[in-house]
């Protein structure tokens, strides 16, 4: 194809003005399955959060987006900005395939501020005769009307010894030096993280991070390395871990190792790999640090499981999680909703409690936040249900004290993905939960953030669930607070 025809084809497919206008027409989101305080689009497929950064007094949230359909094709970047995670400007198309380097997709990457400019770094995907050629490229954000300007290619292809599955750059600085970390696959099909260092004449291969995970999946996606006062943390999403009884139960996982990276040897001495989220619908999170806070957004969805999400028939797929704040303590990450989420509360809390009972119910609002503590008393098994009693559906969380196992059970839902997830959870005398329930997206934080779980439920009718608590013996005490929540406020300046 001649260059002029090539450029014209892309200009027609990815007409920013037309796509942005269609987005504006799609707000406010009206379908009963569209969430109100989870970022999602009126059409197309959303996946990895990208380029999250703070610039000119705003958080900038980029994300993978196919505006042309609900398949994993035509990967672009969307963009929103916010000062407080509640008030947002409407999303726009930010970055899209436009030349030979990224004609098969603008894949994931990161954002950072350099000389007062918001820079983006991302993977260009090009395929010829089913042969993939990845390249890493810089771009500069010019604002929502112009989008991102594509700048130079800084890494032309994968290094020797690795396959073309080489992507998702993220930048970090340590000991006065500047690095990119990329997800990679060795020629022996082992997942790895690879470092490049910025030198005077460009980005040079520093080498592979030597971890204690020599055989840990066939690919590591979306790595981020954060040097924190408490230690270094490598976040990544390994693919190909075999499911076990209490861990690695999704198709693909997302987690971290924490310890100390020696830049001289590139050896990373670390603890165990921990999953960041135990729910059905969580992958490819991006983590960044701003003014001492470590914040995370995740993709609420799972690749290669699109048939489990009924919204595809309505023209859209997937969400991002709420922003979470992370804290590293004794080598383990604890997570919580960002403080800004309290601004979603509509009025005072509704307080509820019960004692010496084996069952309890509390009506929920269309969108709710619940803080709940259940003292076990005589009970050994406790169930917490989102009960859609008008439709005969339920989502169940159950805890077994003898085995210290939490179970997530979606078998009681009629639409969407189902299944069961189990994980270990230490709870001595009481079970503590914080539940955020949107129209379909639910996020739960256990034992003050020791674990978290994100998942979708798609009730067959537009009904509010009831929170139902039951046990196999008398509970000591139930204490709870419920807030009705509002949604994001769009078109904020």
Image (tube, grey):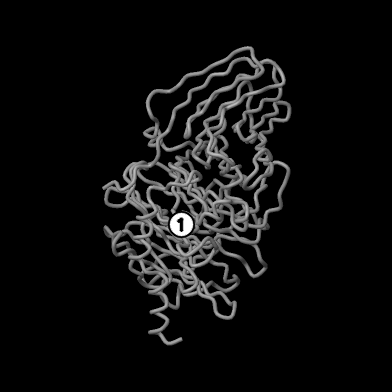
Task: Tally the numbered discs.
Answer: 1
Left or right relative to 275: residue 74: left
Q: Residue 176 placed where, x, y %?
A: 38, 56
Visible residue check, residue 47? no
Left or right relative to 396: residue 65: left
Quadrant of residue 228 within the rendered picture: top left
Visible residue check, residue 286? yes
**Mark 1 crowd level (few <14, some 14–19, many ≥20, 10 Å Cα):** many
Residue drawn at x 36%, y 58% as measured from the top left = 92
Q: Is residue 219 above or below residue 468?
A: below
Q: Residue 134 placed where, x, y %?
A: 51, 72
Q: Residue 283 placed where, x, y %?
A: 56, 51
Q: Is residue 163 above or below residue 266?
A: below
Q: Nearer the viewer, residue 260 or 273?
A: 273
Secondary element under disc 1, as helix, strand or loop, is loop
Residue drawn at x 63%, y 20% as measured from the top left = 429
Q: Which of 186 and 302 is in front in this view?
A: 302
Quadrant of residue 307 within the rendered picture: bottom right
- Residue extending farthest to the bottom is 2
The residue that label 1 is drawn on is 43
């Amino acid at each position: 194809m001649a260059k002029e025809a090539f450029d014209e084809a892309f200009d027609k497919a990815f007409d920013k003005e037309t796509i942005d206008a269609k987005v504006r027409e799609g707000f406010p989101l009206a379908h009963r399955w569209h969430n109100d305080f989870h970022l999602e689009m009126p059409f197309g497929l959303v996946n990895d959060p990208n380029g999250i950064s703070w610039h000119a007094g705003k958080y900038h949230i980029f994300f993978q987006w196919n505006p042309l359909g609900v398949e994993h094709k035509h990967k672009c970047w969307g963009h929103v900005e916010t000062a407080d995670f509640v008030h947002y400007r409407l999303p726009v198309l930010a970055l899209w395939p436009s030349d030979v380097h990224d004609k098969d997709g603008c894949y994931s990457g990161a954002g950072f501020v350099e000389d007062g400019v918001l820079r983006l770094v991302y993977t260009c995907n090009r395929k010829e005769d089913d042969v993939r050629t990845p390249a890493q490229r810089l771009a500069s954000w010019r604002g929502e009307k112009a989008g991102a300007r594509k700048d130079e290619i800084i890494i032309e292809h994968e290094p020797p010894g690795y396959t073309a599955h080489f992507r998702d750059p993220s930048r970090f600085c340590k000991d006065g030096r500047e690095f990119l970390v990329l997800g990679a696959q060795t020629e022996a099909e082992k997942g790895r993280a690879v470092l490049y260092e910025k030198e005077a004449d460009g980005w040079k291969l520093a080498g592979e991070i030597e971890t204690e995970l020599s055989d840990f999946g066939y690919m590591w996606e979306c790595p981020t390395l954060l040097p924190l006062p408490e230690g270094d943390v490598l976040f990544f999403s390994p693919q190909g871990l075999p499911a076990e009884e209490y861990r690695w139960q999704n198709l693909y996982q997302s987690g971290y190792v924490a310890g100390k990276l020696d830049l001289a040897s590139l050896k990373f001495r670390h603890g165990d790999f921990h999953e960041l989220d135990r729910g059905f619908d969580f992958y490819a999170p991006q983590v960044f640090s701003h003014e001492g806070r470590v914040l995370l957004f995740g993709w609420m969805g799972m690749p290669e499981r699109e048939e489990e999400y009924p919204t595809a028939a309505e023209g859209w797929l997937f969400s991002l999680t709420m922003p979470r704040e992370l804290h590293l303590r004794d080598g383990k990450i604890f997570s919580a909703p960002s403080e800004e989420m309290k601004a979603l509360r509509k009025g005072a809390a509704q307080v509820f409690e019960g004692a010496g009972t084996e069952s309890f119910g509390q009506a929920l609002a269309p969108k709710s936040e619940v803080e709940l503590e259940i003292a076990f008393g005589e009970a050994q098994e406790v169930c917490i249900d989102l009960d859609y009693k008008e439709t005969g559906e339920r989502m169940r969380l159950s805890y077994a004290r003898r085995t210290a196992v939490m179970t997530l059970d979606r078998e009681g839902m009629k639409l969407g993905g189902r299944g069961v997830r189990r994980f270990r959870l230490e709870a001595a005398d009481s079970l503590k939960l914080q539940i955020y329930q949107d129209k379909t997206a639910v996020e739960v934080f256990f034992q003050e953030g020791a674990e978290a779980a994100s998942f979708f439920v798609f009730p067959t009718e537009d009904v509010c669930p009831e929170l139902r608590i039951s046990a196999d013996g008398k509970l000591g005490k139930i204490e709870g607070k419920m807030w009705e929540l509002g949604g994001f406020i769009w078109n904020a300046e």
